[in-house]
Amino acid sequence: MIIGSGPAGYTSAIYAARADLNPVLFEGIQPGGQLTITTEVENFPGYPQGVSGVQMMQDLKQQAQRFGTEIRNEIVERANLSSHPFKVETDKGNFYLADTIIIATGASARWLGLESEKRLMGMGVSACATCDGFFYRNQVVGVVGGGDTACEEASYLSNICKKVYLIVRRDVLRASKTMQERVLRNEKIEIVWQHKPIEILGDDSSGVSGVRLENTQNGEQKQVELSGIFIAIGHTPNTEIFKGQIDLDNEGYIITKGGSSHTNIEGVFAAGDVQDTIYKQAITAAASGCRAAIDAERFLCEHKG
Ligand code: NDP
């Protein structure tokens, strides 16, 4: 059983299916995973011209299906890993038993936690420039965050929008040098250093009209007018249903043993962003999916019968 449909899940499915392990893959809440809400993927080897995240995930899905992976559009809501075979229950009320499980549930976008952010969600507040950028053509927007995601979103939006404020809470960007340079060179992007949003302004009928920012050094406040704001401040691993069963680190990421995909439970493996606190790339997720399938195959061979 493979839980998750990002690069890690599909790669483990391709390997497991080719090894005749009859994998069943659960797509989860966001079929295709995080890459379906990014723009161009330019750093995955084999695509000299780049590829859209959506296209890449469709390709991976087809490749997994070609070798016989059974793909189910269900969300795993409960898992009992205390006895073998493992048992899971999905949102459709179905129960499944598995000899081995590969957890590839990834990580989800983080929010600021403001009441106004929640209230104006979908009314100008978004976590996905590719999905929603189109609605802000020739308008002024903001992006919150200083990592690769925030810089990528800001660059993408600068092609569509009149102006992009990149709101960064420190005086440095966390993003890679290439992304930093791309943003710093871009005349349509203005970086608002050392500020954080304390309130998203707007009402339920006309949507977002601005953001109130606080200077992180001296507490001074200012208001910026904009019609859309994109939150890009990192991710939380999707491990809620495994809490108390699988060993997790302080941030909730699954702990794997010595560079392998083994978790603390024999027969349960983890791959992709759900266990990756450092690299978090499509290519590293895919590679760890391959490792998990090989580890699962060895486990099944050793425990035959
Ligand atoms: P990161 O954790 O790298 O960055 C999060 C950013 O958000 C940081 O600048 C952080 O500030 C800021 N932040 C966090 N919480 C708040 C808050 N409450 N208010 C304001 N700002 C906040 O997350 P990313 O999603 O950007 O990237 C995750 C990983 O994915 C990284 O390893 C990245 O390299 C990778 N990635 C790679 C891409 C590529 O190669 N094409 C594309 C996108 C992501 P601070 O710096 O002060 O902590």
Image (cartoon, rainbow, N blue to C red):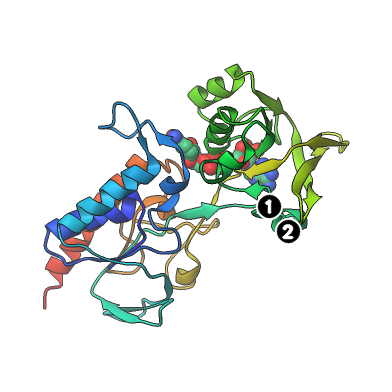
Residue 153 x/y as whole percent: 55, 36
Q: Is mark 2 within 8 Å of ligand 1?
A: no
The label number, if any, that marks residue 119 in the structure image? 2
Judged left or right of residue 70, residue 171 is right
**Residue at the disc numbered 1:** 123
Judged left or right of residue 191, residue 239 is left
**Dividing the picture into quarters, in which one does residue 270 lie?**
bottom left
Query: Disc 2 marks which amino acid?
Result: Arg
Circle 1 SS class: loop
Q: Nearer the viewer, residue 152 or 137?
A: 137
Quarter of the C terminus within the rendering? bottom left
Q: Are marks 1 and 2 in contact (CB under 8 Å)?
A: yes
Residue located at (38% from left, 53% from top): 32
- State the count of labels: 2
Residue located at (56% from left, 32% from top): 151
The local crowd at label 2, few if under 14, some if 14 to 19, many if 20 or more residues have their Cα within 10 Å, is some
The local crowd at label 1, few if under 14, some if 14 to 19, many if 20 or more residues have their Cα within 10 Å, is some
Residue located at (43% from left, 43% from top): 280
Ligand 1, seen in the image, is in the quarter at top right
Q: Is residue 294 visible?
A: no
Give the answer, above or below, for where 28 lies relative to 285: below
Q: Is residue 138 visible?
A: yes
Residue located at (38% from left, 45% from top): 54
